[in-house]
Image: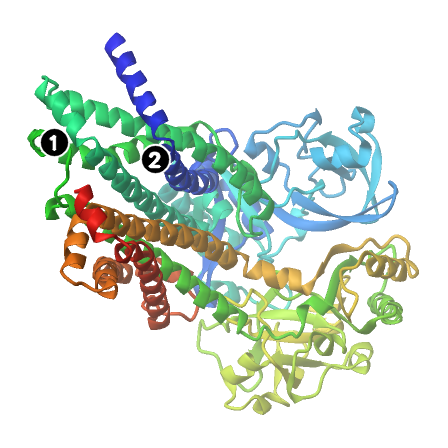
Amino acid sequence: MESFKSQLQQVLRRLGLAPMFTAITIVTLAAGVGANTVVFSVLEGVLLKPLPYPKPDELVGVWLTAPGIQLKDAELSPSDYFIYREQNRTLQDIGLYQGDSVSVTGVAEPEQVPALRVTDGTLPLLGIPPLLGRGFSKQDDSPGAPETVMLTYGYWRRKFGGDSSVIGRNIIVDGKSRQIIGVLPQRFHFLDDDDPAVITPFQFDRNKIHLGNFSYDGLARLRPGVTLEQVNADVARMLPIVMTSFPAPPGFGLKLFEDAHIGPNVRPLKRDVVGDVGRVLWVLMGSIGMVLLIACANVANLLLVRVEGRRQELAVRAALGAGRGRIAADLLLESVILGLLGSAVGLGLAYTALRILAAVAPAGLPRVREIGIDGSVLLFTLVISLFASMLFGSIPIIKYAGVRLSTGIRQGGRALSQSKEQHRARSVLVVVQVALALVLLICSGLMIRTFRALTNVNPGFAEPAALQTFRISILKSQAKGDEQVVRRQEEISHRLAAIPGVSSVGISSKIPMTGGGWHDPIFIEDRTYAEGQLPPLRGFKFISPEYLGVLGTPLVAGRGITWNDTYRKIPVAMVSESLAREYWPDPSGALGKRIRVGSKDDWREIIGVVGDVYDEGVSKPATTSVYWPLMMDHFESDESMSMRDVAFVLRSTRTGSESFLNEVRQAVWSINPNLPLADVHTLDFYYKRSTARTSFTLIMLGVAGSMALLLGVVGIYGVIAYSVSQRTREIGIRMALGAQHQTLTSMFVRHGLALTGIGVGCGLAVAVVVMRLMSSLLFKVSPVDPVAYGAASFGLVATAFLASYLPSRRASVVDPVEALRAE
């Protein structure tokens, strides 16, 4: 122990006597370790950490497949829920849930808040009891029972100041008085959805349920020992029971559901929460891992130089009896101390970076609140610091801890010239750095090309930053009939259009790029359908006459929907260009054709074809859409229907300003003071959110590529600079024999470019293989895109030229007399 303590003190003293070397090494390692810690923290928090519920491995998401209508992930219907709950053999319980938005009035200013609708068993499945009061009972979830509501912790604190006497009080939710029965604890977060403010029970009436209405998410808890294969087989057994236990909806036959070929799709709940973000995170982890390897190569080069300077000291120690193991242990201890110091600084950098990341994380990144530095992250940091220490510390040990040290005594501390063998190790390390840096630069280049391809896609609307959007919901207590609802919406539209700076106002059931929406198949009158064939699902939007013009979506053929069509309930519709071209060679061929949804619906004439709108984001194909009037008769077997929950879109030069939004609220409240506004954003907000994951990946890979380039350049600069310093005598002789300054400079530049060329060659070969692994992240860009490969290679070679040229200039200013005298 005393020996180790003495050895530790000697190492620390030596590092203290070389402050520049120690500082550069620690900063280099801190950058590599810190970057890896950040990305691993995200990977661990999002992907590796179990869900924050008791026995999370038992929790599953319950979905369906419907290959007959090209659906891989279909939601559940209430009919599925009742049969699954009553007749399953593999589940402890099952619950349905659905995100919603509700108005809360009667408590301060009216507001529209996010809500969650659940069956009585949904919250108990997650195993988190209420903080105050109780949860929902079967009675609460029964039709006709008194209306109840639960509050989440954040809303309880914000709206009621954390008052514990709130239990038993009533609030008005969507026009209904509901009794508060419970408050959930602060640690409760429902999956990875934005935390709702209020939670209400569904109150399904089993006697009124029919097949269909696949609009509800399902989750369940497996019985102990049950596998996914067993529960999927159990669901497959129950699906025919569902089909025979409930009637088909009016206007549809049982055959429609048989032809959809509905099947089971039960999977781990964590997969539903995390989605496909794992591919992005693993690519980033691999990329940042390369940065660490480059940092290790840089530090190894520094150590080689440092140990070469200690050759005589190590040789004397070996001559005095210090064995190879003792010298190797001394060198390794120095490497480990440097590694641990670099990791400590890296942890500090990672902590700061994670706080920034939490604030700017893309909207599509799940479980952000669970990202942080915990025990697993600390262990990971310790492991990679030790790995790095062994990696960069082993090279000087292998090279100098053996019999070669005897040459140090014979040389008497005077280096005659740098041998090829001494130079080879540093050159190999530089080649590795250049190769890895090129791979990361190509990754960054491909993501830049992807981002440019995304931004070049016409989304189907113009100037999204000039489009202000919000949602309102008109309750039955505020407008009873369908025509009254639509007239109220039109009246609000006129009030909004009167606001200074507003040029036009439109209404729609759905805002572009917000996901979800209404999807159903449509039937075309002059088409025949094979036995068991169902048309593909189409996106449905219910719009005002001005809506498409406000967006800037072009009219390709025909005319638009009018207010006359809407109020007289004339059976008309519009379709998107991609849908028209799917059936007719020219979009104008769709005009005059008739479509419908259900067999008892009115046939509706296609009067117009409009440009495609990318409703799911520009990285996905444009939705084939049908546009309907806001009010219709005989639609999906309803006698009359209108859209009570709609979005308003305003084109204005004042979007986003607080004064403008205040005027918008006052315009709406002038019609009804109990109409809260929800989801108040510009369309640009949704547009940027649709590309957020690509932007995030681009930024992270850009940071990794920049770090790799910087470290690679430093490595080249260091090797050339050291080569110049070690070959001073040779330079003096060459100059004494008449060598020109340019010749000497070009000699060292050629050496740097030779190393770079070898590294670029190796990097290109590695990149061709690695880039195919990230092909799923690319959009309209080949994994072997020549522009990205060429630009990255040229940029690296150009930078390497500068890194070689600058230290090479020192060779041209060497005084040959002084050089020979020094030797």
In the rendered view, would you say 195 is above or below 456?
above
Residue located beneath label 1 in the image: 412
C-alpha gap between disc 2 and disc 1? 24 Å
Residue on which the image places disc 2: 21
Crowding at dot 1, Cα within 10 Å, few <14 / some 14-19 / many 20+, comes out as few
Residue at the farthest right position: 670
Q: In the rendered image, which quarter is residue 164 located in?
A: top right
Quarter of the image where one finds residue 95:
top right
Residue 734 pos. (x, y %): 15, 58
Viewer-nearest residue: 91 or 652? 652
Locate residue 697, reporting x and y percent.
Answer: 46, 55
| Closer-to-camera residue (774/314) | 314
Q: Residue at x 22, y 23 (%)?
A: 330
Give left or right: position of 540 versus 422. right
The residue type indicated by label 1 comes to Gly
Rendering coords of residue 307 (x, y %): 22, 33
